[in-house]
Structures are given as structure tokens and as C-alpha cells.
Image (cartoon, grey):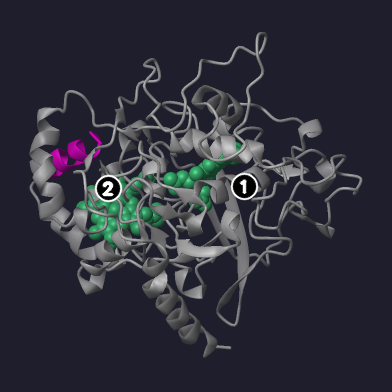
């Protein structure tokens, strides 16, 4: 068993090396331009980045929202409305779920952004290897029937919360070529180098692409993430949920694992519960949002802290700048062509989208192999001033304490931070809180 691991790691590494072949390099042509940004003020109507049509705000008394039939052919306002809808049992909600709509969690400061909600994962070790809790590692917080609310046993010793991430600007992240992420990681000092993962793109017959979304970089495309979230957060089966829209999550109860898929007594709705239209609406809504913009005006302390961020080495993992692939480039295993609104755009996500071990790992393995148990993706810091529950569990409330938790591959950066004067540390924190 133990020999399998290094071999698997090698194979994954080899796959990662060859991936760029399937994604053409951006063609140089017209110069890249800065991506449009939102001011992070929900009172301003400035979320739309120009991908697809904007449409007009939906008033349900007058017109129903219309979902796209293919990526990019719907309207932003309709997609935003669908992202904001609350689902019911008749729509397929549950039987186990975490909340009733995407916006219930992704809401602050604007639709699509952060939330303090956490999801919960659990499992245990067998011969040192992580194994999911019976019925699956995701332990839902809610159910449509108290008989199937999930309760794990004390045998599940590996447990972790995950706080909600923002999805604003994620269309630009989706349009980063594999090679762009690989070149960035290759330039990192060996001791701090991130690990890129290759994950299946559900809408492209599980073709592998470099993961970039989620605390474990567990997804590479917004359709794949949305299909997964529709099932795993809300219990709505769909063609992009990873099992072809046929299976609900079984419920882990004190009496054992209970199958709750239709036609069980717990689920009145045949599968798939969504034909995929809603999933396209979610993906296109997020893809059409602008990138989080800087605080405006930028406070003097943040201006002073700007260069310190690089000086102490935070930028090694929290990469400041990327340029998206050229318009027309085929990505997501060929399922999506980079649109003009998202191509050749300069973004400042402050993340390398790679996994690192900085000593905070939660022991949970998703789709990046046992070696990823204690690795976490560098979270993008753009928009972080709109969030006050920090690190993957959301149990940290200050930037200072978050930096103190940086160990392992981030030890040097943390030590450099601590070697600054008190005034410099405050300036660096002011800089982070201006992102
Ligand atoms: C119960 C709260 C909750 C609901 C409901 C929810 N999410 Fe999330 N979302 C989360 C959490 C928590 C994460 C981080 C999960 C992780 O990476 O393990 C997340 C992460 C994401 C990400 C990754 C963002 C990034 O940049 O890495 C996307 C995309 C996303 N959600 C889309 C959706 C969509 C679409 C829906 C509706 C179908 C949805 N979410 C519903 C809580 C929620
Ligand atoms: C070796 C890579 C690495 C370096 C260097 C690094 N970080 Fe991080 N950073 C991470 C990872 C990985 C996480 C997520 C850890 C977790 O959630 O368990 C993180 C999380 C954070 C968070 C919390 C973000 C959120 O959304 O909750 C902040 C803030 C942060 N880092 C700031 C900094 C600052 C400031 C520095 C420089 C002093 C720095 N980081 C250096 C990898 C790094």
C-alpha cells in the first residue's frame, strides 16, 4: 500500500507537466489590460464585467428569469437572480444539505462574495491514510427530516471546518492557463514551492486540468464547482455533480448510512433534480463578476506597507499579478473558449492557487491524493478587507494572528514579519486590509 503513494504522486506530477500541451499558450498580440474591478460596495451596481449580456434586474411579478442553454448565452441579471434563489423540497432541496441557496453563504459584501458559514468534513485514519467518514466526508449541517440529520461517531478523528470563499472575479481565475500557474510555481524557491493539482473537469468527460478553486484547489472550472456545490451544499442532483446527477449524498446517522436517493421515503423528486441549466447560470454569474478592487482611497499606512509585503516574502505564495489566457483559447478540457471580456486581462489575486503545507493542514484528503492531507491552497487575498473570519476554518479574526499561524513552508515569511518594527507590522497589516 505504502509504495503506491510515491508512484501515484509521480504519475500526477507527470500529468501536471504534460497538461499545458492540451491548453495552447496565450498568443501574443494585443497588449493585456487591467481587469475591471468592483468597489466592494453593495450599494453600487458595478459587479458585471462584460461577459455575455447584462439584461435588466428580474422582477418575478413581471418576468421569470431565463437560464443559459450554453455558457455565455444567458443574461447576467437572470443568472444573478438564479444564484440568489431559495430552493424548496419540490425543487429537490436535500434530503441532506447545508443551506437553501448559493447567496445564503456567498453574500457579503455583495452577491457572490464571502460568508461566515462553514461546511464540515470528517474521516479517520487507516494505516496512516485518510479515509472518508462512512457515507462521505462532507457532513451536512441540515436535513429535510430529523431522522437523517447526520451524526458522526467518535471513530471519525480527523475533523475540519471550511469557511465560505468569495467567488467574485473567479471568471478571470478560470481563464488562467495551466502553463501560467506552472511557470509561477516553478519560479518559487524550492523550500516554499507550491504543489499544483490535476483535477477532473466534469463538463469535459473528466479531462484533467490544474485545480484552482476551493481551499484544496479541488476544482478547475466554474461549471464543475457549481455542479458539486448544487449537490453538496443544497442536495440538488445535476449532470455536473460528479456522479451524473443520479445519486444524493447518503446520510451518516447513528443507525448507520442511509440511502436517501429517490425513490427513498426521504426524497420525493426524481433525479437529476436540475437538468443543468441552473448550474450554467451559477457558473456564468460568477464568471461575469468583476475582480475585487482595492480600497479607495488607499490609506497612507497601506501605501507604506505595500513594499513590505514583498520584502518579507508574503508575495512568494500570495502572487500579486497574473495575466489571463488570450481570447479564444480553449480551456476546461476544450469545453470553454476564453471570452473577450475575460481574456488577456491583468489580475491581482494575491494567490498562486497552489497547495502548501504551512502547518495548518486539516488532514482531509479530497481529490489531490494522500500527500495533500496537510496542504491548503494559498487563499487569494483580493477582497479580504470584506472578510473577518480568516484561515480555512474561519476561526481566526485578525491578520496578525493569521500570520502567526504561518509555519512550515511559510516560516521564513512569518519570522521576517516578526522581525519588523511594530510600526512596520501595522503598515503591512494595513496593506493587506486594503486589498
Ligand atoms: C452552506 C454555505 C454554502 C452554500 C449554500 C454554497 N457555498 Fe459555495 N462555498 C462555501 C464554502 C464553505 C466554500 C469553500 C469550500 C471548500 O473549498 O472546501 C465555498 C466555495 C465556493 C467556490 C470556490 C470559490 C473560489 O474562488 O475558490 C465556488 C465557485 C462556490 N462556492 C460556488 C457556489 C455555488 C454556485 C453555490 C450554489 C449552488 C454555492 N457555492 C453554495 C459555502 C457555500
Ligand atoms: C509558503 C506560502 C505562504 C507564504 C510565504 C505566506 N502565506 Fe499566507 N497563506 C498561505 C496559505 C496556504 C494560507 C491558508 C492557510 C489555512 O487556511 O490553513 C494562507 C493564509 C493567509 C491569510 C488568511 C486569508 C483568508 O482568506 O483567510 C492571510 C491574511 C495571509 N495568509 C497573509 C500572509 C502574509 C501577510 C504573509 C507574509 C507575512 C503570508 N501570508 C505569507 C500561504 C502562504
Q: Secondary structure of the magenta portion, mostly?
A: helix
Cα distance between the residues tagged 1 and 2: 26 Å
326 relative to 192, above or below: above
User: In terms of secondary structure, where does tag 2 sit?
Assistant: loop
Identify the residue at the far top of this view: 62
- What range is drawn magenta here? 425-435
The reply, left or right, for residue 306 in relation to residue 107 is left
Label annotation for residue 89: none
Please give the residue where the numbered disc 1 appears in the rendered image.
227
Residue in the picture at 43% in, 82% down: 10
Please give the residue where the numbered disc 2 appears in the rendered image.
350
Question: Residue 422: in sight, yes or no?
Answer: no
Residue in the foreground of this view, choosing between 378 and 180: 180
The reply, left or right, for residue 95 in relation to residue 175 is right
Residue 145 in the image: state x and y as whole percent: 82, 40
Q: Quadrant of the C terminus?
A: top left
Q: Quadrant of the N terminus?
A: bottom right
Residue 271 in the image: state x and y as whole percent: 80, 46
Residue in the picture at 19% in, 59% down: 413
Residue in the foreground of this view, choosing between 149 and 93: 93
Amino acid at each position: 500500500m505504502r509504495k503506491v503513494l510515491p508512484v501515484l504522486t509521480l504519475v500526477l506530477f507527470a500529468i501536471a507537466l504534460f497538461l499545458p500541451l492540451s491548453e495552447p499558450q496565450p498568443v501574443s498580440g494585443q497588449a493585456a489590460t487591467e481587469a475591471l474591478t468592483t468597489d466592494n460596495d453593495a450599494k453600487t451596481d458595478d459587479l458585471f464585467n462584460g461577459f455575455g449580456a447584462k439584461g435588466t434586474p428580474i422582477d418575478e411579478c413581471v418576468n421569470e428569469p431565463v437560464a443559459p442553454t450554453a455558457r455565455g448565452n444567458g443574461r447576467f441579471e437572470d443568472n444573478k437572480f438564479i444564484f440568489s434563489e431559495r430552493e424548496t423540497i419540490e425543487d429537490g432541496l436535500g434530503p441532506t444539505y447545508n443551506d437553501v441557496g448559493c447567496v445564503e453563504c456567498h453574500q457579503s459584501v455583495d452577491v457572490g462574495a464571502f460568508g461566515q458559514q462553514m461546511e464540515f468534513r470528517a474521516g479517520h485514519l487507516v494505516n496512516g491514510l485518510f479515509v472518508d467518514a462512512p457515507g462521505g466526508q462532507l457532513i451536512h449541517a441540515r436535513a429535510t427530516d430529523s431522522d437523517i440529520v447526520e451524526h458522526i461517531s467518535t471513530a471519525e478523528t480527523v475533523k475540519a471546518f471550511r469557511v465560505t470563499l468569495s467567488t467574485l472575479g473567479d471568471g478571470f481565475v478560470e481563464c488562467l492557463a495551466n502553463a501560467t500557474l506552472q511557470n509561477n510555481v516553478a519560479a518559487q524557491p524550492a523550500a516554499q514551492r507550491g504543489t499544483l493539482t490535476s483535477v477532473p473537469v466534469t463538463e469535459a468527460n473528466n479531462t484533467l486540468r490544474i485545480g484552482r478553486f476551493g481551499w484544496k484547489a479541488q476544482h478547475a472550472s466554474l461549471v464543475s464547482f457549481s455542479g458539486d456545490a448544487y449537490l453538496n451544499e443544497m442536495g440538488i442532483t445535476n449532470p455536473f455533480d460528479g456522479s451524473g446527477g443520479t445519486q444524493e449524498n447518503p446520510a451518516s446517522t447513528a443507525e448507520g448510512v442511509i440511502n436517501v436517493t429517490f425513490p427513498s421515503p426521504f426524497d420525493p423528486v426524481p433525479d437529476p433534480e436540475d437538468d443543468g441549466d441552473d448550474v450554467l447560470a451559477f457558473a456564468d454569474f460568477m464568471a461575469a463578476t468583476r475582480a475585487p478592487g482595492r480600497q479607495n482611497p488607499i490609506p497612507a499606512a497601506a501605501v507604506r506597507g505595500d513594499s513590505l509585503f514583498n520584502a518579507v516574502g508574503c508575495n512568494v505564495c500570495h502572487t500579486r499579478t497574473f495575466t489571463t489566457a488570450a481570447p479564444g483559447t480553449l480551456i476546461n478540457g476544450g469545453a470553454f473558449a476564453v471570452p473577450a471580456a475575460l481574456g488577456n486581462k491583468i489580475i491581482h489575486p494575491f494567490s498562486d492557487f497552489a497547495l502548501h503545507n504551512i502547518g495548518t493542514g486539516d488532514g482531509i484528503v479530497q481529490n489531490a491524493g494522500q500527500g495533500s492531507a496537510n496542504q491548503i491552497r494559498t487563499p487569494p487575498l483580493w477582497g479580504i478587507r470584506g472578510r473577518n473570519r480568516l484561515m480555512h476554518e474561519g476561526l481566526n479574526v485578525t491578520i496578525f494572528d493569521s500570520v502567526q499561524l504561518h509555519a512550515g513552508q511559510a516560516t521564513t515569511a512569518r519570522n521576517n514579519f516578526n522581525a519588523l518594527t511594530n510600526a512596520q507590522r501595522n503598515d503591512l497589516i494595513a496593506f493587506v486590509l486594503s486589498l
